[in-house]
Amino acid sequence: MAKVIYKFGDDISTDIIYPGRYMATVLPDETPQYAFDDIKELNKILTGSKVPEGSIIVAGKNFGTGSSREQAVSTLKGHELVIIAKSFARIFYQNSVNLGLRIIICPDIDAEPGDELEITDGKVINRTQHKEFEIIPHSKTRQKIIEAGGLIAYTRRRLLEKEV
């Protein structure tokens, strides 16, 4: 089980996730410090304390809208967050798969910061509120890519399997 550390509404842009003024910083080990830099409360949570791996951000519809900047995903991946949203913007969704960010599409999600959530194969269970919500699954291939840690790791694994 993991806790919700923050909740967003709809249409959270990549500029909110990773402000454009940091675009010159592209190394995945450097981008996490700038996650949600304009939302000081959340940035402080992420950078000031050790947020347990798998901590959850909940969002409404169209999370990751805007530009195609990959850093918006790498900054979240650097904190090993799970993003549960009602829906994701198309390019952000594909970048998330490619980088292995754990994203969950859950159109009816209802959770607040501090709630404890359990994620199963087909549901998100809010243990705090005693509610369950259906997940829209990724395609099998996309799920394998996410589980492998991203497209490069997935491809490397597939190539090594063929060599055996």
Image (tube, helix red, strand yellow):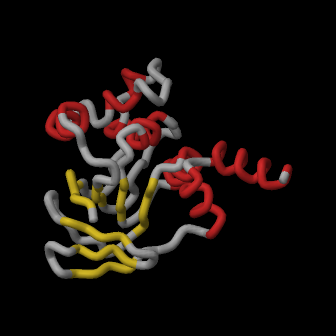
Left or right, residue 160 beside residue 117: right
Q: Nearer the viewer, residue 9 or 132?
A: 132
- Counting from the top left corner in percent of width and height, residue 31 is at 40, 28
Eyeballing the image, is 4 above or below 52? below
Q: In which quarter of the image is residue 76?
A: top left
Q: In which quarter of the image is residue 45?
A: top left
Q: In which quarter of the image is residue 118?
A: bottom left
Instruction: Name the residue located 35 percent from the left edge and 49 percent from the top edge.
Output: 81
Q: For the view shown, which residue lies furthest in the front direction? A: 164
Left or right, residue 24 beside residue 152: left
Instruction: Name the residue located 22 percent from the left edge and 35 percent from the top edge.
Output: 43
Instruction: Name the residue located 44 percent from the left edge and 27 percent from the top edge.
Output: 29
Instruction: Name the residue located 38 percent from the left edge and 46 percent from the top edge.
Output: 80
Q: For the view shown, which residue lies furthest in the top direction? A: 24
Eyeballing the image, is 99 above or below 62? above
Left or right, residue 53 beside residue 161: left
Count of numbered marks: 0
Eyeballing the image, is 29 above or below 60? above
Eyeballing the image, is 104 above or below 74? below
- The quarter in which the N terminus is drawn is bottom left
- Counting from the top left corner in percent of width and height, residue 25 is at 45, 20
- Counting from the top left corner in percent of width and height, residue 58 is at 28, 59
Q: Nearer the viewer, residue 163 or 110?
A: 163
